[in-house]
Amino acid sequence: SRASGACVFQIKDYTDIKRILGAGQDTTSDDFYVGDYRFRILCCPNGSSEMYEGYVSVFLEYLSVRDINPISKVQMSILPGKYSKSTFSLTREEYRFKKCGDTWGWNDFISHEKLQGDPEPKQIGSKKPSKDTSADWWTNFIVRFQDGLEACR
């Protein structure tokens, strides 16, 4: 059977968190469920390692211990705030979580330059920010399970 769902992870004071956390350090969402499966979002504001320091890395972590492991197509998005009404999204094709602690996502989800500066025209509104406004328009991060979450043996 298929279960579907979504989780919104709000990162407050993003600019301060980015300043505090180094490469490889993350902030996490609360745990959430899709059907009987437990997940959380991991966000590394300065990349998952030194190799990705110029990027925000985001991952979905599987937290259930079950014999039946889920497979899903996942979309992750930044939902902007006052400077834009559009979203920035990436979608991953199907992936099978095999064990508790498996992570799946992007080391290079979005570059700091794109997040803090002038995103591509299709991704920003008409008002141009005058300073680092990542804390203003990085208001919510969402993971959406597309086409449902399917149990596999």
Image (cartoon, rainbow, N blue to C red):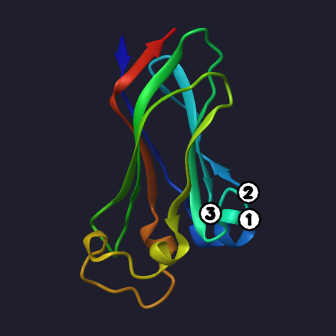
Which image quarter holds the N terminus? top left
Marks 3 and 2 sit apart, C-alpha to C-alpha, by 9 Å
Determine which residue is flagged by label 2.
Answer: 24
Marks 3 and 1 sit apart, C-alpha to C-alpha, by 12 Å
User: 122 left or right of 153?
Assistant: left
Q: In this view, does 123 lie above or below 42?
A: below
The percent coordinates of residue 47 (x first, y second) are 65, 61
Residue 124 sits in quarter = bottom left
Amino acid on which the number 2 mark rests in the picture? Gly
Residue count near mark 1 (Cα–Cα under 10 Å), binned few <14, some 14–19, many ≥20: few
Amino acid on which the number 3 mark rests in the picture? Pro
Marks 2 and 1 sit apart, C-alpha to C-alpha, by 7 Å
Residue 114 sits in quarter = bottom left
Q: How many labels does the image show?
A: 3
Determine which residue is flagged by label 3.
Answer: 45
Amino acid on which the number 1 mark rests in the picture? Glu
The percent coordinates of residue 46 (x first, y second) are 66, 66
Image disc number at residue 50:
1
Q: Earlier in the sequence, mark 2 or mark 1?
A: 2
